[in-house]
Image (cartoon, helix red, strand yellow):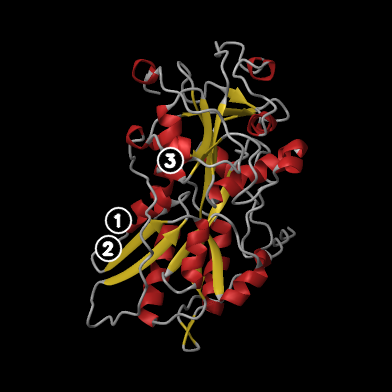
């Protein structure tokens, strides 16, 4: 992590506030907070309108939603093989914004880190499927501490965010890090104040590993944070943790890697230590999608076992079951087919994990069954796969 001690050694964030307190004292820093590359747009999501393919040979599709998968969507939309005839624009407006945009018909697909339930999908006329798997990571700005050097337990992170552990040299932290010289200073936790799928992933795991956290704050896209400094979006989280020392925050691993932040190594209950990587995300994803009848919902309780990264989850694509235009619908499904078949190399390069291959046929079969234009199917495939693998062939007796 670059050394910022000389440049920022006198800068300090204000004292932490109660969740209900205004953020005026932080936002007044204005000129000190420099913009970074992954800021979320504030302009409205444009309306997605049917396009006549003959009159407009280059189709234009709109996607919007979570910041968690934004780096991967940006690369996919630039590099897919139909880029010369199909332009896809993705705007990161948050999971809730993506859900609202696809529900209102303002985009061709939405992206959410928060899976919707069967009843909500049905009432909105939507299909849901995982587009990628990735990890949320705790990151710190501590002088002299590089990526992976600080070790924390998930329950200890919960204690920090609920205000039970308040100093970097707390015995619970130093016991896990005997080789580090930790400052005798207050910890400044940073969290999202806006509705956030990243927050949902982060707090979901905190609630699973800490009863005290579950009782105080629970989990969700917004929670009543007991302590800490609130940021208005993902870009401001990045601003704060980059510019101010002795902070801890959470964000998607690709963002942390892109900005060379110091992510945390986690010690699990059996004293095993695990670091964020495509390998540990893939381990967490093994068998995590559970029943295919549950709209491919990732089982976050599965993450954090057998070497899997605890804060692993999926990001979901949302599309309309009744499509307004056949050419647009086919182009959209062809794009997602490409992301599943060939876009996985891009995903791995950006520290995401492709959706497990064993569920891809079931995703495409859902398209066959549900995606329609004026009642006619849009997508055709080979006969559907069996829900259960065939029994093994018995050996032939000699």
Per the image, the residue denoted by label 2 is 83
Tell me whether circle 2 and circle 1 mark residues in contact (CB < 8 Å).
yes
| CA distance separating discs 2 and 1 | 7 Å
The correct choice, above or below, for 138 with respect to 43 in the image is: above
Residue visible at 24% across and 72% down in the picture:
58
- Disc 2 is placed on an element classified as loop
| CA distance separating discs 3 and 1 | 26 Å
What label does residue 284 carry, if any? none
Q: Which numbered disc, 3 or 2, marks the residue that appears first in the sequence?
A: 2
Q: In the image, residue 266 lies at what x, y percent?
A: 61, 29
What label does residue 78 carry, if any? 1
Observer-nearest of 226 and 156? 226
Q: In the image, residue 234 lies at what x, y percent?
A: 45, 44
In the rendered image, is residue 158 in sight? yes
Circle nearer the viewer, 3 or 2: 3
Per the image, the residue denoted by label 3 is 236
Residue visible at 37% across and 76% down in the picture:
328
Observer-nearest of 49 and 225? 225
């Amino acid at each position: 992590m670059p050394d910022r001690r000389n440049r920022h050694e006198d800068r300090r964030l204000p004292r932490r506030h109660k969740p209900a307190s205004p953020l005026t004292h932080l936002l007044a820093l204005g000129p000190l907070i420099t913009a970074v590359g992954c800021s979320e747009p504030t302009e409205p999501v444009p309306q997605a309108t049917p396009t006549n393919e003959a009159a407009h040979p280059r189709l234009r599709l709109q996607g919007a939603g979570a910041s968690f998968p934004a780096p991967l969507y940006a690369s996919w939309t630039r590099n897919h093989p139909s880029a010369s005839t199909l332009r896809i624009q993705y705007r990161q407006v948050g999971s809730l914004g993506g859900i609202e945009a696809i529900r209102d018909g303002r985009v061709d697909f939405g992206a959410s880190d928060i899976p919707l339930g069967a009843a909500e999908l049905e009432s909105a006329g939507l299909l849901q499927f995982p587009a990628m798997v990735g990890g949320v990571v705790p990151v710190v700005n501590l002088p002299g501490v590089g990526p992976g050097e600080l070790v924390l337990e998930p329950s200890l992170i919960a204690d920090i965010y609920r205000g039970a552990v308040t100093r970097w040299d707390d015995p619970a932290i130093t016991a896990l890090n005997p080789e580090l010289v930790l400052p005798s200073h207050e910890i400044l936790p940073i969290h999202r104040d806006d509705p956030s799928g990243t927050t949902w992933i982060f707090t979901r795991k905190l609630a699973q590993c800490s009863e005290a956290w579950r009782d105080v704050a629970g989990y969700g896209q917004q929670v009543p944070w007991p302590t800490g400094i609130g940021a208005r979006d993902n870009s401001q989280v990045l601003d704060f943790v980059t510019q101010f020392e002795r902070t801890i925050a959470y964000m998607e691993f690709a963002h942390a890697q892109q900005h060379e932040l110091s992510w945390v190594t986690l010690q699990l209950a059996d004293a095993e230590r695990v670091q964020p990587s495509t390998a540990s995300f893939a381990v967490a994803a093994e068998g995590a999608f559970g029943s295919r009848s549950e709209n491919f919902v990732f089982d976050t309780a599965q993450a954090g076992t057998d070497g899997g990264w605890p804060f692993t989850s999926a990001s979901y694509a949302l599309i309309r079951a009744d499509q307004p235009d056949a050419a647009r619908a086919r182009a959209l499904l062809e794009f997602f087919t490409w992301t599943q078949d060939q876009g996985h190399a891009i995903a791995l390069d950006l520290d995401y994990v492709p959706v497990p291959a064993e569920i891809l046929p079931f995703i495409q079969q859902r398209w066959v069954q549900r995606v329609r234009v004026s009642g006619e199917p849009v997508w055709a495939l080979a006969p559907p796969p069996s829900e259960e693998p065939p029994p093994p062939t018995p050996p032939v007796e000699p």
